[in-house]
Image: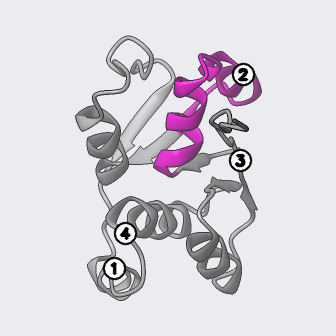
């Protein structure tokens, strides 16, 4: 089954040091180039040793018309992830952001997500 991922499921797992969980579930994933670039420019983690070619395939979106329509409502990573998942007829789209999930559902994409919340201790003083 082909899996396409948006940025946040990967980045959230990287942030908590649990990216191996995703790799255990999905032996291969595909990400659009915008997602790869979003991960690459993040200063929070080094993806070069994690997103290896034996696990992650980076692909360009071909359907520029669909991409343009999606970019009117979503950020580049979400828009490209949805467009690529539709193009490739992916079995699952990994996406967390509410707006992106809603758009993917409307377009008939099977989706899964991961929500990671980081809470700062409150000053109860």
Instruction: Name the N-terminal-most of marks 3 and 1.
Output: 1
Q: Secondary structure at mark 1?
A: helix
**Quadrant in the rendering for residue 69:** bottom left
24 is higher (above) or lower (below) than 28: above
Q: Are marks 3 and 4 in contact (CB under 8 Å)?
A: no
Please report contact status of discs 2 and 1: CB closer than 8 Å, yes or no.
no
- Circle 2 residue: 21
Q: Residue at x 50, y 52 (%)?
A: 6
Image spot of residue 89 (x, y percent): 60, 63
Is mark 2 in CB contact (under 8 Å) with mark 3? no
Q: CA distance from mark 3 to mark 1?
A: 23 Å
Q: Which residues are magenta?
A: 6-29
Work out how far the residue at label 2 is from the one at label 1, CA to CA, in angstroms.
30 Å
> Marks 1 and 4, how far apart in space?
6 Å
Residue 115 badge: 3
Q: Earlier in the sequence, mark 2 or mark 1?
A: 2
Q: Which residue is mark 4?
A: 75
Identify whether 5 is placed above or below 22: below
Q: Which mark is residue 71?
A: 1
Q: Earlier in the sequence, mark 3 or mark 4?
A: 4
User: How many angstroms separate mark 2 from mark 3 (CA)?
Assistant: 14 Å
The quadrant of the rendering that contains the N terminus is top right
Residue 25 on the magenta span: yes
Spatial separation of the CA atoms under disc 4 and disc 2? 26 Å
- Mark 4 falls on what kind of element? loop
Tell me what residue is drawn at x 53 percent, y 47 percent: 8
| Magenta stretch prevailing secondary structure | helix
């Amino acid at each position: 089954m082909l899996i396409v991922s948006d940025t946040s499921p990967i980045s959230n797992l990287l942030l908590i040091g649990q990216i191996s969980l995703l790799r255990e579930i999905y032996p291969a994933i595909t990400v659009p180039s915008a997602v790869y670039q979003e991960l690459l420019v993040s200063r929070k983690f080094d993806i070069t040793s994690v997103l290896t070619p034996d696990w992650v395939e980076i692909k360009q979106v071909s359907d520029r018309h669909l991409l343009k329509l999606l970019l009117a409502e979503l950020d580049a990573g979400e828009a490209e992830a949805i467009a690529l998942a539709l193009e490739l007829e992916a079995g699952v789209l990994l996406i967390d952001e509410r707006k992106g999930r809603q758009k993917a559902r409307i377009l008939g994409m099977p989706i899964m997500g991961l929500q990671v919340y980081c809470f700062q201790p409150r000053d109860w003083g």
